Structures are given as C-alpha cells and as structure tokens.
Image: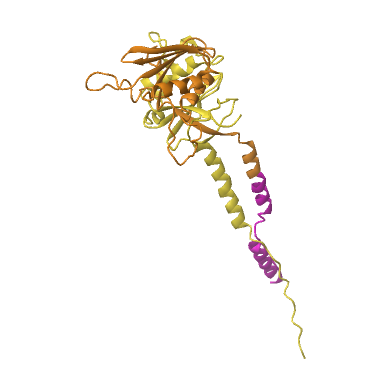
Chain colours: A yellow, B orange
C-alpha cells in the first residue's frame, strides 16, 4: 500500500560566489592599503631607513613620500632624478645657487597634481647612508618651491 | 518533434549550470598570502625638520632673549661642537662625539632647564643616519621612566631645527 517515497537526489552545492566576492574585496583592500597608508610604506630598491626610538607616528593622511636612495630621488611613485652614490650631479643644480636642485624644482612645479599639494606633508624617506648634503639640498629646494611641511622619516624596526 | 524537445532540454540544462568558482577561490586564497609575504613593510616614524623654527629667538619686550639656544655643529660622528648661546652670547662651549652626545645634552638640559631649542648645522661628511641620531637624542624623554604613550612626554628639546638649510 505504501508507496515508497523516492529519495530526492539532493546535491549540496556550496555557494562560492559570496566568498569569492569577499576575497576580491580583500585583495583590492590590501593593495590599496599598502600604497596609501602613511605608516606602512613599501620601500623597494634597498632603501634602509635609519633607526630611531623617539620619532612619532604621523597622523596626517595627506602625505607625499620623497624617497632618496643612493641612486635616485623619487616623489610619489615617480623617479624624478638619478643620483650617483647619493650625490646630485652638478648639471641638475642651479647655475647661481649651488644648493638649489633646479632639476627637481622643474619637475615638481610642472606636475600639476603635485604643485597643488602644498598643504600636504612631504615625508623624506632617505637611505641611512645618503649624505646629509643631498637631504639638505632637497629640503631647500622643496621649501623654495613652496612645500614647507617637510618631515624626516625613520623606522623603529631593523630592516 | 522529438529532436526539438531534446534540444530544448539540453538548452535548459546548459542555462542552469552554475559557474565553477572553486578555482577562482583557490586563486584568491593563494594571492592574499603572496601579497602579504612580498610586501616589505616598515613602520615609518617621523621627526619634524623645522625648516622655519617655531621659537627662533623668542625675544622678550625688554629685548632680553627668553631662552638659551643650543647650537650643534657636526663635522663627523666623532667631532661635534656644542655651543649654548643666550642673547647671542656664548655661555657654554664644548666638543664631543656622537656616542657621548646624549648624556651631555641631558646635563645641559639640567643646567639650563629653560632651553628648548636645538639648532643643527653640519660641515663635512655627515650622513642622514647621523642627523637622525641627533634628532633621536634631542627628542628623547627627559625622564627615563616617562614612556607612557597616554601622557605627554617632556623631551629634551621641543624645537629641533636644521639651521643650515637656508645658510647655504
């Protein structure tokens, strides 16, 4: 009398769409986070920041990184000048002012996006072996170009 | 007719088939650790490089300078000349090395507690590392026990300036 109910062939399918969405968001988030966070800047090309215990973490989100290695000066993501052992070639300097890097000034002021960022904090991430002369000339040039909020970067951890 | 029905059934089957996202998910799971592992991250800390000093020569109304100022002239890591000036007159002068600088600065701060400004000049072959070391020492806490982040830490010098930027 009883009809046996046929068991339905029920397959359990895990909905992966939502999981893939979440992972995609995570990947994008990580990539963006590393490029914009003022505290976590990815330093390539062997830039070893000097160690310091008493420096403070920046709270400002409006930062522009100026990376000075022994081979180049990079503003933001763009390498603007090439250096030789951390020294600036004389042809990049101003004729009448030996402290003014006209090559750097020209490139920054011609860049419309950069020249509008005078209120931003310019963070100098220099290799520990770079001569102070180069740092001094860079700060001088930035200040003359109107970028006066200049900070010197260090790190708390051994790199 | 039979062939048409068969075609329709096949089309329905194709339409109902879900995309297999498992390989995509595996790729994502692989990418995240790779991104995390490949990023060389540093905790960046900063010092204010006061190009334009905040309290440069604070002059009282009677013309007397309010606070003494320390001038550091670094020739190299073993040769640092220290001069304390008040009203543009030298009141203390000595030489030291980078290794001995911190205790000396602490002693100076104890001797002249009103002193808040340190001005750095460089001559010769000085690296960025040396300058940061001087900044680090000048910004060290006055009392060694006061390292709580919640309280305002009193540092040896409030205002550390790179004096020679505009001197040329």
Q: Quadrant of residue A138?
A: top left
- Indicate the position of residue A128 as horizontal and vertical percent values: 55, 21
Say which residue appears at 68% left-offset and 51% top-offset.
B23
Q: Quadrant of the N terminus of chain B?
A: bottom right
Q: Residue at x 74, y 76 (%)?
A: A7
Give how far across and how far down residue A90 sits, in percent.
47, 9
In terms of secondary structure, what is the magenta stretch mainly?
Answer: helix
B155 relative to B4 in the view: left or right: left
The percent coordinates of residue A105 (x first, y second) are 41, 20
Q: Is residue A80 in view from this perspective?
A: no
Visible in this render: residue A135? Answer: yes
Image quadrant occupied by the C terminus of chain B: top left
Q: Is residue A51 magenta?
A: no
Question: What's drawn in magenta, residue-wise?
Answer: B1-30
In the image, residue B4 above or below residue B112 = below
Q: Is residue B120 above or below residue B159?
A: above
Residue A107: quarter of image: top left
């Amino acid at each position: 009398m009883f009809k046996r109910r046929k068991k339905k062939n029920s397959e359990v399918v895990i909905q992966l769409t939502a999981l893939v969405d979440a992972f995609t968001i995570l990947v994008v988030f990580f990539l963006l986070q590393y490029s914009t966070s003022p505290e976590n800047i990815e330093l390539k090309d062997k830039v070893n920041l000097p160690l310091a215990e008493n420096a403070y973490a920046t709270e400002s989100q409006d930062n522009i990184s100026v990376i000075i290695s022994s081979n180049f000066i990079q503003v933001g993501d763009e390498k603007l000048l090439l250096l030789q052992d951390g020294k600036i070639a004389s042809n990049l300097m101003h004729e009448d002012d030996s402290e003014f890097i006209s090559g750097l000034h020209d490139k920054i002021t011609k860049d419309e996006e950069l020249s509008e960022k005078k209120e931003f904090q310019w963070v100098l991430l220099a290799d520990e072996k770079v001569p102070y002369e180069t740092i001094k000339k860079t700060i001088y040039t930035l200040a003359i170009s109107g970028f006066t909020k200049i900070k010197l970067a260090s790190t708390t951890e051994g790199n | 007719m039979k062939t048409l029905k068969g075609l329709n059934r096949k089309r329905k089957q194709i339409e109902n088939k879900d995309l297999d996202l498992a390989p995509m998910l595996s790729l994502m799971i692989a990418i995240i650790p790779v991104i995390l592992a490949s990023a060389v991250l540093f905790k960046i800390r900063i010092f204010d490089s006061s190009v334009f000093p905040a309290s440069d020569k604070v002059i009282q109304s009677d013309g007397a300078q309010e606070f003494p100022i320390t001038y550091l002239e670094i020739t190299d890591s073993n040769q640092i000349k220290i001069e304390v000036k008040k009203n543009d007159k030298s009141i203390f002068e000595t030489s030291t090395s980078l290794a001995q600088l911190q205790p000396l600065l602490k002693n100076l701060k104890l001797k002249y507690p009103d002193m808040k400004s340190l001005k750095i000049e460089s001559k010769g072959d000085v690296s960025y590392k040396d300058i940061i070391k001087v900044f680090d020492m000048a910004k060290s806490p006055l009392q060694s026990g006061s390292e709580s982040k919640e309280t305002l830490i009193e540092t040896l010098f409030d205002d550390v300036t790179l004096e020679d930027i505009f001197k040329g």
